[in-house]
Structure formats: C-alpha cells, structure tokens
Image: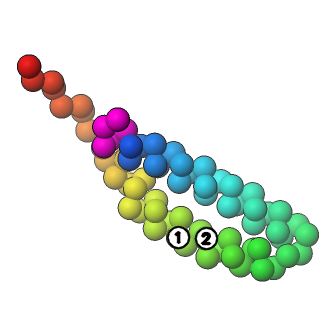
Amino acid sequence: MTEKTKICEMADIIASIKKEAEILKELGCSCGNKCVEMNVVRMSAMIKMLELNITDVADILEAQPEPAMSY
C-alpha cells in the first residue's frame, strides 16, 4: 500500500467519523442530552484538525498525477 493510498484511506475514515459524530450530536439533542452535544462539539474540533492534517493533503495528492514507473 502506497503512502498516497494510506492517506486517502485515512481521509475516507475521517469523513466517516465526521458523519457519525453529527448523527450522535443529533441523537443527543433529540433526547435533551446536553453533555452528548457538548462532547460532540469538542470531538468536532479534533476532527477538524484531522481534516486539516490529512484530508487537505489527500486532496493535493489526488490532484497530482502518478509518477511514471521507471524500469
């Protein structure tokens, strides 16, 4: 597995975590559980840092063509 593939896989996992955190927040809000909502807000800040660190890099890597293989 190449570095580019690993980074793209991490970016996909981060996107999934972000979606799941939003679902958790909605569930917490719907039953009036303020502590769940506030903890998801904190989680969202950490997820944002992961996005900046990994997802942005994945976007840049996907925009670049694969280097030609030399034999």
* Secondary structure beneath label 1: helix
Seen in the picture, residue 5 relative to 7 is either above or below; the reply is above
Direction from residue 63 to residue 54 in the image, left or right: right
Contact between marks 2 and 1 (CB within 8 A): the answer is yes
Residue 31, quarter of picture: bottom right
**Residue 62 visible to the viewer:** no
Pick out the residue farthest to the left: 71
Direction from residue 14 to residue 29 in the image, left or right: right
Q: Residue 43's x, y, as percent?
A: 61, 70
- Residue 20 sits inside the magenta stretch: no
Magenta-highlighted residues: 1-5
The numbered mark at residue 70 is none
Seen at 85% across and 76% down, the residue is 33
Seen in the picture, residue 55 relative to 41 is either above or below; the reply is above
Q: Residue 46's x, y, as percent?
A: 52, 70
Direction from residue 16 to residue 70 in the image, left or right: left
- The crowding category of the residue bearing disc 2, from other C-alpha atoms within 10 Å (few below 14, some 14 to 19, many at least 20), is some
Q: Which residue is mark 1?
A: 46
